[in-house]
Amino acid sequence: MKPKLFLTIAGVYFLLDGLAGFFMVSGFDFIAYAYSIFCMSLGALFLMTRNEAASTARNAIFMAGFLSSFFVSLVAYYAQWNGLFLDSPAGYIPPTLWLIVAIGFFLVGRANMSSSGS
């Protein structure tokens, strides 16, 4: 997959997940809102950098996308396994989506990594 296409898909996914976070809580929940802002910020970053040429900065963006998505998926799996997320097996869908995004960042970033120091 081309980096431009993947960054577009990931950017839209992060933005939609961030926007959804604002509508999923009642009252003020700092953690939920902070997560939403985090997702929207990364989504904007991915969309703004999708046209950049291969460089160490783009490599770092792919690594940040991989790490953030991977650890969000681990935390979500942990929450689901401990009964803190959803009471149904459908609770495994969001962590699996995050894991798929993390694997995508790793594979696409690795395949299109810049070897120069520019």
Image: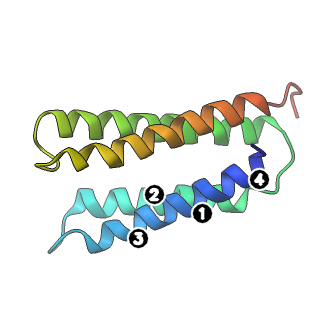
Q: CA distance from mark 4 to mark 2?
A: 19 Å
Where is residue 67 shown, x and y percent of the image? 50, 34
Judge depth for marks 4 and 2 and give the one in front: 4
Total numbered circles: 4
Where is residue 14 shown, x and y percent of the image? 50, 58
Dot 4 alpha-carbon crowd within 10 angstroms: few under 14, some 14 to 19, many 20 or more: some
Tell which circle, 3 or 4, labels the residue nearer the N-terminal end: 4
**Residue at 20% of width from left, 69% of height from top?**
25
**Residue at 23% of width from left, 47% of height from top?**
91
Q: Indicate the secondary structure of the residue bearing disc 2.
A: helix
What residue is shown with label 3?
19
Tell which circle, 2 or 3, labels the residue nearer the N-terminal end: 3
| Mark linked to residue 77 | none
**Residue at 76% of width from left, 29% of height from top?**
111
Judge depth for marks 1 and 4 and give the one in front: 4
Which quarter of the figure is the C terminus placed in?
A: top right
Q: Nearer the viewer, residue 10 or 36?
A: 10
Callouts 3 and 4 close, C-beta under 8 Å: no
Tell which circle, 4 or 2, labels the residue nearer the N-terminal end: 4
Q: Amino acid at mark 2?
A: Cys
The answer to whether residue 7 shows anywhere in this view is yes
Q: CA distance from mark 1 to mark 4?
A: 14 Å
Q: Amino acid at mark 1?
A: Ala
What residue is shown with label 1?
44
Where is residue 116 shown, x and y percent of the image? 89, 27
Q: Amino acid at mark 3?
A: Leu
Q: Is residue 44 above or below residue 89?
A: below
Q: Amino acid at mark 4?
A: Lys
What residue is shown with label 4?
4
Dot 1 alpha-carbon crowd within 10 angstroms: few under 14, some 14 to 19, many 20 or more: some
**Residue at 47% of width from left, 41% of height from top?**
69
| Mark linked to residue 39 | 2
